[in-house]
Image (cartoon, grey):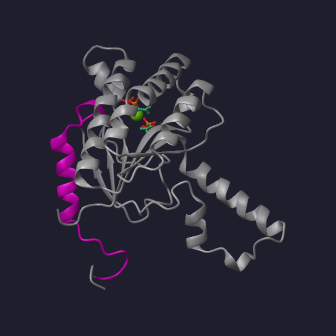
Amino acid sequence: MADLPKHIAIIMDGNGRWAEAQGLPRIEGHRRGVDSVRMVSEMASELGIEAITLYCLSSENWKRPQPELDFLMHLLEQYLVEERRLIMEQGLRLKVIGRRDRLPESVITEMDKTLQMSAENQGTALVLAIDYGGRDEITKVVRELAREVADGKLAEEKIDEELVSSRLYTAGLPEVDLMIRTGGDFRVSNFLLWQLSYAELWVTESCWPDFKRELFLSAIDDYATRQRRFGGLSVNQ
Ligand code: IPE
Ligand code: IPE
Ligand code: MG
C-alpha cells in the first residue's frame, strides 16, 4: 500500500461512554476495548506497520475512582498473560513507555515476562503507553540532561533535538506519522507531545470498543491522501 504510515499512535478513548450507552458499567467498556487492541495489533502486523503506540493509561488517569483503577490494572495483567501467545505468533515486539513505579508488582512481573519473551521478535513494535504523560516524559529528560551538564559530563551546546529525541521513551522508533483518536474529542490529552509535532491527526466519533477493521483502514487510507509539508511549500521540497 502506498504511503503507509510507519508509526501509528492511538488514543483509545470512549470506553466508558460506550458502556453507558449499552446500560453497562464503565468497566465493561474497558473489557470490550481489549478486542479492539487485538484487532489493531493484528492488522498493524499484517500490513507491516513498523510501530503502533497505544495510550492505555495516562498520568492523569490516576484521578479516577479506585475501583475503576483496580479493574484497569487487573485487565492489564490479564492482557499481558492471555495475549502473550498471539503476540509471539504475530512476531510483535512489546515495548512499554511511561512510569513503572506506580504500577502494581503483579503487573510489572507479567509485563517483564512478555517484554523479555518478545524482545527478539522482528515484527511490528507494539508500544503500550501505561502511566504515560508527555509532560512527565519531557520533564524527565530535562532533569537528566541538566544533571549531566552539572556533572560536567555533557556540554550545554551538545543539547539539540536529536539528543532530546534519543532520550525520550520512544528513542529508536520511527516518527509518529498518524495519530488516531476514538470517542470524538479533538485533543491530545498529554499524549506524545514531542513526537506528535508533524503527525497527521484522525478523529472518529466511534468509541474504542466499536473501532473495527474498516475504521482502521479508513484512517490509513485517509492518511495516504494527506499532503504533508513539514513547514515547506510542497511535499517534494
Ligand atoms: C479510555 O476510555 C480508556 C482510559 C482512559 C483508560 P475512557 O474510560 O476515558 O472512556 P470515556 O472517555 O469516559 O467514555
Ligand atoms: C486519554 O483519555 C487517555 C487514554 C485513552 C488512556 P482520557 O479520557 O483520559 O482523556 P480526557 O480526560 O478526555 O482528555
Ligand atoms: Mg475518556
Image quadrant assignment for residue 131: top right
Q: Does any portion of residue 12 appear in the rendered image? A: no
Residue 177 image offset from top left, x and y in percent: 34, 61
Residue 154 image offset from top left, x and y in percent: 75, 72
Which residues fall within the magenta stretch? 206-233
Q: Residue at x 28, y 13 (%)?
A: 23
* Residue 157 as seen in the image, left or right of residue 224: right
Ligand 3 is found in which quarter of the picture? top left
Q: Toward the viewer: 166 or 94?
A: 94
* Residue 180 as seen in the image, left or right of residue 65: left
Q: Is residue 64 magenta?
A: no
Is residue 75 placed above or below 185 in the rendered structure? above
Residue 68 image offset from top left, x and y in percent: 48, 20
Q: Residue at x 48, y 43 (%)?
A: 129
Q: Residue at x 49, y 56 (%)?
A: 193
Q: Does any portion of residue 125 appear in the rendered image? A: yes
* Residue 117 as seen in the image, left or right of residue 103: left
Residue 55 image offset from top left, x and y in percent: 43, 42
Image quadrant assignment for residue 43: top left
